[in-house]
Image (cartoon, rainbow, N blue to C red):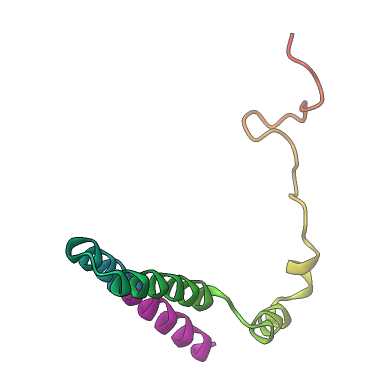
Amino acid sequence: MLRSFVRGLLGRLLGYGGLLLGFWWLREALLEVNYPVGVLGGLTILAAMYMVVGGRRRPNSAIQAELAELSETELSRSEEDNPGDSLDGRDESNQLPP
């Protein structure tokens, strides 16, 4: 759990730093008309977005470990106890108004 937290945090921080660097390179390329720096900035932005998304993704083993920790009652509870109308407590969702 701690390892996935650190991995996610590090991936996001590196990704956000990469986005900042990539947009700065794009700005410099547009100000000085420097095409290689612009291409490098665009590639850096794409790689940084991949890192941000990769930092949010969890491996299947972490998901399975969390599911194993849940009790049977939490997994079997899929519907609300009272599926009625939340405003006045009546279940008239299948009737048209007058």
In the displayed structure, 92 sits above or below 59; it is above
Residue 43 position by quadrant:
bottom left
Q: Residue at x 30, y 69 (%)?
A: 35
Q: Which is more toward the observer, 51 or 35?
A: 35
Q: Is 96 placed left or right of 31 in the picture?
A: right
Single out the residue that lies furthest toward the top. 98
Magenta stretch containing residue 5, yes or no? yes
Per the picture, the main secondary structure of the magenta-coloured stretch is helix
Residue 41 position by quadrant:
bottom left
Residue 62 position by quadrant:
bottom right
Q: Residue at x 40, y 84 (%)?
A: 10
Q: Which residues are magenta?
A: 1-18
Q: Position of residue 71 (x, y in %)?
A: 74, 76
Q: Is 29 placed left or right of 77 in the picture?
A: left
Q: Which is more toward the observer, 66 or 51?
A: 51
Q: Quadrant of the N terminus?
A: bottom right
Q: Which is more toward the observer, 9 or 84?
A: 9
Q: Quadrant of the C terminus?
A: top right
In the displayed structure, 45 sits above or below 64; it is above
